[in-house]
Amino acid sequence: MTRLVPMLGMVALVAAQQPAAPGRNEIDIVHHLANSHTLEIPSFRPPYYKEVELPQFTPFRVGRLVIDLSPTRHVVFLVLAAVLVGLVFLYTSRAVARAHAQGRPPRGFPAAMEAMALYIRQEVILPNVGPHGEGYVNYLLTVFFFILTCNLLGLLPWSATPTANIAVTGAMAFVSLAVIEISGMRALGVKGYLGTIFYLPPGLPAALKPAMLVIMTPIEIIGKLAKPFALAVRLFANMTAGHVVVLALIGLTFFFQSYLVGVAASLMATGIMLLELFVAFLQAFVFTLLTSVFIGLMRAEH
């Protein structure tokens, strides 16, 4: 599974290169959520963090396209997420293999990771992908744990949430679209796959076939594009919304400059953060589940 982490991370990396417009000097919600060429590190003076500039490279041109490969805040955390997933599963796989070789079940963290991976494999991926779906397990497990790690990193102080960047979620949805369509081509053949675009119901009179093609072909194409669009927007919106609510609640303290408001806002923000922890797992689960369902539907289009 870990050999697919660099591929998935690099695809999202390229899509996340362009940072948002530089924020103002004031501390605002957009500034903390947007991508930038800076990293926040802890500081002992208000506002208790300072920004460190990331290296910037000279953009180069490919025809009319200008490509800037300078690292950004979200790129750094994408790389960190990919490295963490790889290291965790290298450690887990070795610990589980060592435990099995000794004739005992794994314990502690490796046992928890094995249980989670087995649950996603047995209860989410294989039942929805369908028969002979083992080949998709590596990719879909990588998707789940990569998204989960990105989501959880965004809950740490002085961090950033890569999945709150529409370019990142869009790139991951595009990879899923490619997997879905290629799996359809392999399962159905060229003729069967074209039938998912140019749809003609069996037994349709010849005179109605042109009209049916004109009506159904755009609908089928829109249906194919709607799947990755829904995957990208759902993940992006859910990870962004929670952070906006937390920052807005904390901002009430400084707006009203009241201890009472500060205590109430802190309690509500804590509740939202606990909900965000649940959402981090939920959105990784939903992205993996829907991708599995879409692959299964495409492989059994008939």
Image (cartoon, rainbow, N blue to C red):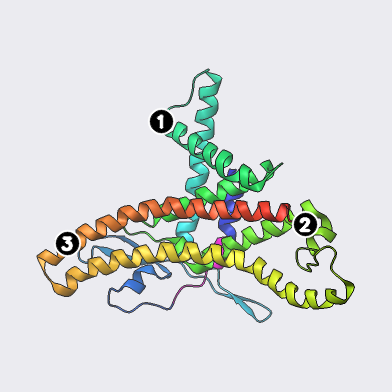
Tell me the kind of residue under disc 1.
Answer: Gly
Measure the C-alpha gap from mark 2 to mark 1.
42 Å
Tell me the kind of residue under disc 3.
Answer: Ala
| Marks 3,1: beta carbons within 8 A | no
List x then y, in percent, for residue 17. 52, 69
Q: Nearer the viewer, residue 272 or 85?
A: 272
Q: Residue at the location (49% across, 39% down)?
A: 116
The part of the chain drawn in magenta is 12-20
In the current view of this chain or complex, which residue is farthest to the bottom? 64
Q: Which residue is mark 1?
A: 108
Label 3 vs label 1, nearer the camera? 3
Secondary structure at badge 3 equals helix
Q: Is residue 13 magenta?
A: yes
In the current view of this chain or complex, which residue is farthest to the top? 103
Q: Which mark is residue 93?
A: none
Secondary structure at badge 1 equals helix
Q: Which mark is residue 264?
A: 3
Q: Which residue is mark 2?
A: 185
In the current view of this chain or complex, which residue is farthest to the right? 206
Q: Specify few, some or many for label 3: CA neighbours under 10 Å numbering under 14, 14-19, or 20 or more.
A: some
Q: Residue at the location (32% across, 72% down)?
A: 29
Q: Nearer the viewer, residue 148 or 196?
A: 196
Disc on the earlier residue, 2 or 1: 1
List x then y, in percent, for residue 296. 67, 51
Secondary structure at badge 2 equals helix
